[in-house]
Image (cartoon, rainbow, N blue to C red):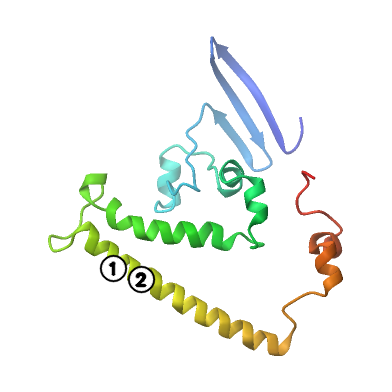
Amino acid sequence: MNNYFNFELISKDKNARLGKLTTAHGEINTPIFMPVGTAATVKAMHLKDVEAAGAEIILANTYHLMLRPGQENIREIDDSLDVFAVHGVGGILGTLLVAFLATSTFSGLGLSEEQTGTSQFIIQLKAVVLTVIWTSFFTYLILKLTSLVVSLRVDEQEEIEGLDLRSHGEKGYHSD
């Protein structure tokens, strides 16, 4: 058995299987309820509630980002930590859609009597715009102050060669 990953078939009945998946982090019995963290199914839940629902494992960002939008599209994003791609786009879109998804039409709790989906959307849009302005201003300010102390860019040769290879002696993407 490999120390990192093993699957043991316990029994089989036609197309159904009962098994045990062993990882470096523990054992997982199959078949299994596996919520998707990336799709926000567990973001609003307490860990105890996720465990009580029977989840022994949670699928997360890396797997889903490789499915959609895919490795080639992720490579084209000039964001080393995928911060904007994941949190910026997902956060902005999620914040705006809350105005409509919170209505009882979409199984939400509903809005107060004086609000409509459109009025709540305008409130959410103002909050997004204010947040983008606020974070842009302070990010610019922090970068300007930092640039007074240290350089914000590596030298041209390091940039051409690639920081993963130059700093760590390894490639960041191994599919080439």
Residue 123 marker: 1
Q: Is residue 171 left or right of residue 63?
A: right
Where in the figure is residue 65, as x and y percent of width and height?
A: 58, 47
Report helix, strand or loop for mark 1.
helix
Residue at horizontal 19 percent and vertical 59 percent from the top: 116
Q: Is residue 120 left or right of residue 66?
A: left
Q: Quadrant of residue 128?
A: bottom left
Q: Which residue occupies the extreme top position in the image?
A: 14
Q: Which residue is mark 2?
A: 127
Total marks in image: 2
Does the residue at mark 1 contact the one at mark 2 (Cβ under 8 Å)? yes
Residue at horizontal 32 percent and vertical 65 percent from the top: 124
Residue 66 marker: none
Q: Is residue 129 left or right of residue 1?
A: left
Classify 139 as above or below 162: below
Q: Is residue 7 left or right of residue 69?
A: right
Alpha-carbon span between mark 1 and mark 2 = 6 Å
Residue at horizontal 56 percent and vertical 30 percent from the top: 29
Depth check, front residue: 123 or 24: 123
Instruction: Give the position of the N terminus as an image quadrant.
Output: top right
Classify 49 as above or below 114: above
Q: Residues within 10 Å of mark 1 (few under 14, many from 20)?
A: few
Q: Quadrant of residue 122?
A: bottom left
Where in the figure is residue 140, as x and y percent of width and height?
A: 57, 82
Where in the figure is residue 38, as x and y percent of width and height?
A: 50, 48
Instruction: Give the position of the C terminus as an image quadrant.
Output: top right
Q: Amino acid at mark 1?
A: Ile
Where in the figure is residue 150, as x and y percent of width and height?
A: 74, 84
Q: Amino acid at mark 2?
A: Ala
Q: Which residue occupies the extreme left position in the image?
A: 113
